[in-house]
Image: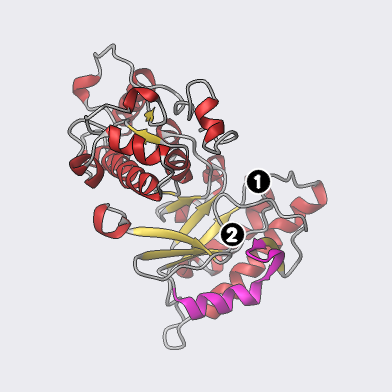
Amino acid sequence: MARNRTGIKGVYVALEDSLQKDALVILGPRRHPPVPARAANTNTSIAIQTSLGFSTLESDDYVKAAQRLRPDIILGMADYEYLKRPGVKRLEKMGDRTLAWTQDMLSGLHDNVDESPNTPFFAPVLPIEAGLQSEYLGTLQEELAESVSGWVIYNPASVDAIPPEMLHLPRLAMTELDGPHAVLDQISLGIDVLILSFIGEATDAGLALTFAFPGPERLQSEERLALGINMWLETYVSDLSPLVEDCTCYTCSNHHRAYIRHLLDAKEMLAWVLLQVHNHQIMDSFFDAVKSGPAEPRRNPQAFRTLEDATERLADAVLPSSDADGTELEKHGFADKLV
């Protein structure tokens, strides 16, 4: 369904999971967002969670997996522990470990003929102060620049740490975003590729996304729009309109709100499939508008900022609750799933 009914052209896959490769595949060591691991990283491995429980991923094993799986893009392994604040001694090790793991991967990816990586490699920028990783990034610039195809960003503020000679490389953000406002903020900071887990979270909660990036004609509007609609609500039981008027997705072209509401109430998996198809279409249209207009962020950052401000003024800051009063949410097993 996703392949045939959406514009999705790529996926991010963590080595913790498995996926049949039938699209652009970006391989990283951990899922997004990662599950906090109990153990600490070591000089040769990072702590992960697999389908069998917590474990460790050795740098050598990650290299072997990259060689075997041959993804389209490989993300470097970073000495970064999710939701843990590093101590002073730990900060001193982070750059050294990440550099060693980066060298391991690049050595394993090098083509024997021209000594260049045969798979694009994105190097991590650690979520710490620039001075604490200057030696690591300096080595990348001076010795490995030809082998690095892009950057992995864990904190948008760390973009400033990228060496000036390598600022032209694309940047992929492994950050947690809660909606379109956060997406626009990161685009304005120079992020090129985003991994959007909030789309799936909205779908899981029974929300149909409705937001759009405003064109210049909406700048004078006073109407404030919701980012999505809660399809659990009783008001949609007999609503024969599409999820969003003029939406061209498969769901809106073939089904109405009442049908989606019925499927949700019956706990039919098709409800979430149809919502996911629609929600990805909304996000596709959002990015198309960002890229195609005169306010394209790279060409005209000031105009882009104006429309970004308009988006914040004209649309709610957060997605709606999954349920108006909590009763339906609890009944259907989403008691703690508020988006």
Magenta stretch contains residue 60: yes
The label shown at residue 30 is 2
Give the residues in magenta.
49-70
Residue 248 seen in the figure: no
Residue ID at (36%, 44%): 271
Residues under labels 1 and 2: Cα distance? 19 Å
Q: Give the SS element for disc 2.
A: loop
Q: Give the position of the N terminus as an image quadrant.
A: bottom left
The label shown at residue 176 is none
Residue 158, image x, y percentages: 56, 44
Residue 162, image x, y percentages: 52, 50
Is 127 displayed left or right of 269 in the figure? Answer: right
Residue 198, image x, y percentages: 46, 41
Residue 165 higher or lower than 186, as above or below: below
Residue count near mark 1 (Cα–Cα under 10 Å), binned few <14, some 14–19, many ≥20: some
Which numbered disc flags the more N-terminal residue, 1 or 2?
2
Residue count near mark 2 (Cα–Cα under 10 Å), binned few <14, some 14–19, many ≥20: many
| Nearer to the camera, 311 or 5 | 5
| Nearer to the camera, 51 or 41 | 51
Residue 201 seen in the figure: yes
Residue 130 higher or lower than 44, as above or below: above
Circle 1 residue = 128
Residue ID at (42%, 71%): 20
Residue 15, image x, y percentages: 56, 67
Residue 205 higher or lower than 316, as above or below: below
In the image, what residue type sits under mark 2? Arg
Residue furthest out toward the top = 222
Residue furthest out toward the right = 89
| Nearer to the camera, 268 or 339 | 268
Q: Give the SS element for disc 1.
A: loop
In the image, what residue type sits under mark 1? Ile
Is 82 displayed left or right of 180 in the figure? Answer: right
